[in-house]
Amino acid sequence: MDTNHNTTLRRRRSPHHSNNNIKSWILLALASTTILTFGIVSTNQNNKLSNTAVIATSSCPHGQERTWHGGHPAQTHPGSCWCGQDEYCMCTPSVAIDIVLYQKRRSSGTTTAFNNSPKSIGTNEFNQNNKDEYDVWVVRRSDTNQLATIGGFVDTGETTESAVLREVLEETGIFIPPHLMSSHGSNDDGGGNSIQTKKDSAIKLIGVYSDPRRDNRRHIVSIAYALEFRPDIMTTNDGSGIPHAGDDAKDVIAIPLEEIGVKYVGEDWYADHLSILLDFKMQLMSMEDGGEVDRSKELYGGDIARSTCS
């Protein structure tokens, strides 16, 4: 009797037990489906990311090693090359601008108000005959503590002339009216029409410097300009009318042009900037009364590949 009763109880429990099993199987199936779906989605996402990584790697093969032979002393430097999304690779030199910022100074003796500025170094003993002389504004680099011309790299989408405007403002605080940066300037043709001439331009091309040995960092091609600082028509951002250090320059100082290559030589200067300054010095002297320029103390004795203007 008890046995039958137990059997009956077990039989009565069976429908409920079966329902519970069905519910468990349903929940387990749903959970499995969810996990499986999530796994598939994750796998697809990982595949997409993986494919993206492959595409990025194939279109920008940064790992492709390149070398360039340059610097001073000249040696082989390892590097790599970036490529565009169109898979076109251009492993080319960087483009920079160097600016010889000079200022005319008329002296009637051994001192001038301009050279009494604390921003000036050097002497005026060379100027005894009331003729025009020049000072060159240069920067002292914060990384090497060497003297250098004002300048920097040209940004993508920027002209070299625009880079001159930007770098001069960043490193010296001088704002140059854009029309003075034209290679022409403006004049009236007599009929009320503005025409372009070189007469009033403040900028002049010195040359192009492309020797791989000129800079230790990388192969850099520099376009060098001479820019005359005219305080009467140019302003400084602090209103003082005197250039001052900004950006990454440690200091901005004025050096008499005659002392460049005589007193300040060799390792005093960063890269081939002494060559750029002496090229400018020769061009300026040829426009005036001639003279000799000692080039023996330049980088590589002045044997730096460049193309200069006459």
Image: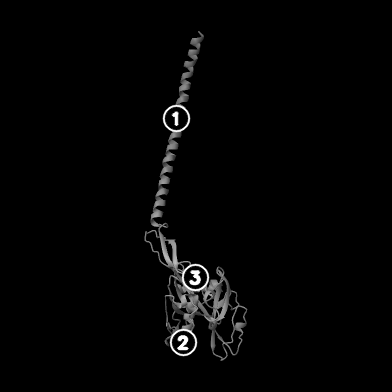
Marker disc for residue 287: 2
Q: Which residue is drawn at the image coordinates 44% and 34% (left, top)?
A: 32
Q: Nearer the viewer, residue 222 or 261?
A: 261
SS assignment at label 1 = helix
Q: Which residue is drawn at the image coordinates 46% and 34% (left, top)?
A: 31
CB under 8 Å between discs 3 and 2: no
Q: Is residue 114 left or right of residue 21?
A: right
Label 3 crowding class (10 Å Cα cut-off): few <14, some 14-19, many 20+? some
Q: Which residue is drawn at the image coordinates 44% and 28% (left, top)?
A: 25
**Image quarter of residue 308:** bottom left
Q: What is the three-letter code of the residue carrying label 1?
A: Ile
Q: Nearer the viewer, residue 186 or 171?
A: 171
Label 1 crowding class (10 Å Cα cut-off): few <14, some 14-19, many 20+? few
* Numbered marks: total: 3
Give the mark nearer the N terminus: 3 vs 1.
1
SS assignment at label 2 = helix
Q: What is the three-letter code of the residue carrying label 3?
A: Gly
Q: Residue 170 location, x and y as percent?
A: 54, 71
Q: Give the mark toward the camera: 1 or 2.
A: 2
Q: Which residue position is annotated with label 3?
A: 152
Identify whether 198 is placed above or below 42: below
**Image quarter of residue 144:** bottom right
Q: Nearer the viewer, residue 39 or 248?
A: 248
Residue 25 appearing in the image: yes
Marker disc for residue 26: 1
Q: Residue 254 location, x and y as percent?
A: 57, 79
Give the mark nearer the N terminus: 1 vs 2.
1
Residue 148 appearing in the image: no
Label 2 crowding class (10 Å Cα cut-off): few <14, some 14-19, many 20+? few
Q: What is the three-letter code of the residue carrying label 2?
A: Met
Q: Residues under labels 3 and 1: Cα distance?
A: 70 Å
Q: Residue 83 location, x and y as percent?
A: 40, 60
